[in-house]
Image (spheres, helix red, strand yellow):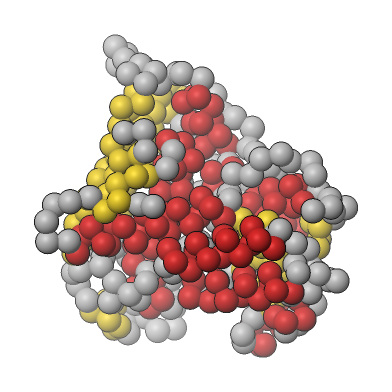
Amino acid sequence: MRSLSRPVRTALIGCGMIADEYATTLASSSMVTLSGCADIRDDKARAFAQRHHLRHAAVTDLLDPAVTDIAVILTPPASHADIAHAAIRAGVPGIYAEKPLATSPDQAHALTCATSQAGVLLCAAPDTILGAPTQAARAAINGGLLGDVIGASASYLSSGPERWHPAPEPFHTADAGPLADMGPYYLGSLVYLLGRIGGVISAVTATRPLRTIATGPRAGEVFTATAPTHVIAMLCTDTGIPVIFTSSFDAAGTRAPHLEIHGSKATMAMPDPNFHTGDVLIRRAGSRRWEQLSPAQPAVTPAGRGMGVLELAEKLCGTRSQLACTGRSAAHVTSIIDAIYRAARSESITAAVLH
């Protein structure tokens, strides 16, 4: 693949809430230029284009290598694979998808194979691993500051998006829930820091199927949740590191750390992996106090949703050798989520093995 010149032309497919954050981050960088936006709802695309001073067009018009170098897919997860395959057929050289990459491991695997065969670069969210906290944590692990890693835990515990989102139903559909919606941030960070997951044991529950919207014009309206809303999994990396992961839309509150990694020399506590900033704390063996780890440089700048698009743009321009937010990593996270659900459905306590 020949290197592109900057700025790399980037199109946003999907103009929902998250797209505003992407547009803000990308507009702050000289690496890319926003070539346009599209949405299934023309009125939404038109309003988004006016806010961000873009042109809006049909998806098929933007999936054209004559006008677009990177297609950024910000649509609901069920449509990610179809749009990505359309971009591949059109010859767009780079594709970036919001999480999750696809709604099944088979879809994700087919997508990674198709992009590889076509010579297209595929990347996917979450890109929070490119922020300073995860970069500092990775440097600490690789530098031996923790000693031998012996275990980890991760916790996402909330009372559900209906308390803050005006239209929360998509978060509670069968292919969403706390595991598929928020799990990729935590699982993506764990895989990036500790390596691939090889086995899973899990249990899930579904409580309070009737949920009440707490904010916006539909406040007080009741809807039905169909996804499991409390998930506990014990994961094991390919190198034998055990990890406990909990994700929930049923918790009134929590004091559990978002992510802790325990080593023979120290324990490290990390901030919410849903964000690109925050303090990383370390407590050394024998010490009574937590110290703040020196912050690392983020892998790309500016920080925010869209860092992964900038990383991909640098790769397409030949100024970056390695990618962190790869399609293969995102596909692996999709497989972990599927394995957690498969293990929970098993009648015997056996691990669902990932392939």
Instruction: Name which residue lies at 28% across and 76% down.
Output: 225
Seen in the picture, residue 288 relative to 311 is either above or below; the reply is above
Q: Position of residue 324 (x, y in %)?
A: 59, 44
Instruction: Name which residue lies at 51% across and 20% down.
Output: 143
Q: Position of residue 314 (x, y in %)?
A: 75, 47
Instruction: Name which residue lies at 57% across and 76% down.
Output: 82
Residue 94 seen by the camera = no
Q: Position of residue 299 (x, y in %)?
A: 65, 39
* Side (left or right) of 13 relative to 260: right
Number of marks in the rendered image:
0
Residue 324 seen by the camera = yes
Seen in the picture, residue 152 relative to 72 is either above or below; the reply is above
Seen in the picture, residue 83 relative to 116 is either above or below; the reply is below
* Side (left or right) of 342 relative to 27: left
Quarter of the figure with residue 172: bottom left
Quarter of the figure with residue 163: bottom left
Quarter of the figure with residue 53: bottom right
> Among all residues in the image, which is located at the extreme left?
348
Please tell me which residue lies in front, 80 or 309: 80
Q: Position of residue 194 (x, y in %)?
A: 42, 35
Instruction: Name which residue lies at 40% across and 21% down.
Output: 146
